[in-house]
Structures are given as structure tokens and as C-alpha cells.
Image (tube, rainbow, N blue to C red):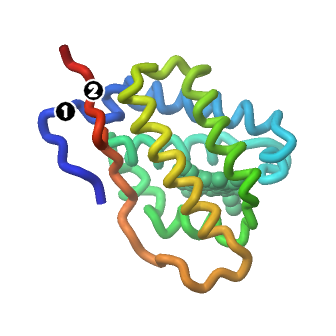
Amino acid sequence: MGVQEPDLPTLHEWAGGDHAVRRLIDAFYDRVEADELLSPFFPGGVSEHHRDHVTAWWAEVLGGPTRYTDELGGYERMLAHHRDLDISPTQRYRFASTMSLAADDAGLPDDPEFRAAFVGYVEWGTRLAMHNARPGADDLTEHAPVPRWGWGVAPPWLG
Ligand code: HEM
């Protein structure tokens, strides 16, 4: 999974590295904790443990360190966490649009190329999450690599 883009910075580098990804995830879950559609998924709030693990997932997806695969259980652990969550289309959309707002909160680069790649992954990932979360689903992809997202059709403007 993932397009080889050897001459380009990774999305992780462009975003500002691990610290920027952590700022994104904190901004996102701070909003989730206050959201009437999303907070019920996280009774008692979103733990440090969860924030750290999801940061590792995102850093890896964006082309950074592979800690989620190497130390945290990889795709299979992510899949296990979404099984049977029963995510509605309205909740999926709220999740995706909240990620976009969190990217602003966290001061991630706002160039159109980065944001297009970012929301492309958010749209893809949330739709897969909703699919994987159907109660009793028995047709899921059980094993896969953690995805590595790229710039797609609009690479960064490097002058
Ligand atoms: C781009 C989309 C998504 C990504 C990248 C993502 C990523 C992850 C990851 C990596 C975990 C496991 C964390 C760990 O290892 O401990 C997780 C858990 C979880 N996700 Fe997602 N997720 C996405 C979409 C969603 C959506 C749309 C919802 C609900 C609206 C959701 C709700 C949850 C919940 C409630 C857990 C924790 C479940 C538990 O602790 O048992 N996720 N997510």
C-alpha cells in the first residue's frame, strides 16, 4: 500500500513530524470529548493511552516512524478496536469534519496540496472504519499492512 514518492518529503515531514501529529490528535480528541455525537464512544474521556496510540498510527500512515506496526499491534489491533462499534454515517461525517477543524487548531500546514492529501486519507479511513464497525460483520479484511499515504495527484509546491 502506498505510492513511492522518492523525491518528495513525506506528509509526516511536511506536517512537522511527530510533535505536530500529536498536536493534531490532541486537538481532535479535545473536540471529540465535547461533541454530542462522538463523545459516547469514549466514556470518561479520551485517555492518554488512546491519544498516544492513535498518534503512532497517524505518524506511520503519513510516512513517519513505524511504531504502530513494530510495537503496538499493527493493522490487526486497529481492526479489533473498531469491530462492532456501530458507527453511523452521521457520526462518520462528524469525525471526518472534526479532523479537518483539528488540523487548523493544531496549526498544520494549510497549503491546498497537504490538506487535499490529508482529507483524502481521513475520508478513506473513516469509511473503512464505518465498514469495519458494522455489528457482527464477518467479511472484514483480517490482515493488512498499516497504510502509507502519499501526496496523490497534487504534490507539494516546492518552488
Ligand atoms: C481515519 C479514520 C480512523 C483512524 C485512523 C482510526 C484509528 C484508530 C486506532 C489506531 C485505534 C486503536 C488505538 C489503539 O491501538 O489502542 C482506534 C480505536 C478506536 N477508534 Fe478509531 N480510527 C478512525 C475512525 C474512527 C471512527 C470514525 C470512529 C467513531 C466514530 C472511531 C472510534 C474509535 C474508538 C471508540 C476506538 C477505541 C475502541 C476501544 O478502545 O475499544 N474511529 N482508532
Look at the picture and state if 112 lies above or below 125.
Answer: above
Write down the residue under mark 1.
8
Badge count: 2
Mark 2 vs 1, N-terminal side: 1
Look at the picture and state if 133 lies above or below 17.
Answer: below
User: In the picture provided, is 94 more to the left or to the right than 118?
Assistant: right
Q: CA distance from mark 2 to mark 1?
A: 8 Å
**Viewport quadrant of the C terminus:** top left
Residue ID at (61%, 20%): 105
Amino acid type of the residue that numbered disc 2 sits on in the rendered structure: Pro
Which numbered circle lies on residue 156? 2
Look at the picture and state if 50 lies above or below 76.
Answer: above
Image coordinates for residue 113, horizontal then vertical, percent: 36, 28
User: In the picture provided, is 46 more to the left or to the right than 142?
Assistant: right
Image coordinates for residue 81, horizontal then vertical, percent: 63, 64
Whether the residue carrying mark 2 lies under 8 Å from ligand 1 is answered with: no
Image coordinates for residue 63, horizontal then vertical, percent: 31, 42
- What is the crowding at mark 1: few (fewer than 14 residues within 10 Å), some, or many (at least 20)? some
41, 151: nearer the viewer: 151
Question: Given this view, does label 2 or label 1 mark the residue nearer the observer?
Answer: 2
65, 8: nearer the viewer: 8
Q: Secondary structure at mark 1?
A: loop
155, 35: nearer the viewer: 155
Q: Secondary structure at mark 2?
A: loop
Instruction: Tell me the quarter of the picture where residue 16 sits.
Output: top left
Image coordinates for residue 33, horizontal then vertical, percent: 79, 37
Q: Are marks 2 and 1 in contact (CB under 8 Å)?
A: yes
Residue ID at (55%, 83%): 139
User: In the picture provided, is 92 more to the left or to the right than 115?
Assistant: right
Instruction: Tell me the quarter of the picture where residue 100 sits.
Output: top right
- What is the crowding at mark 2: few (fewer than 14 residues within 10 Å), some, or many (at least 20)? some
Amino acid type of the residue that numbered disc 1 sits on in the rendered structure: Leu
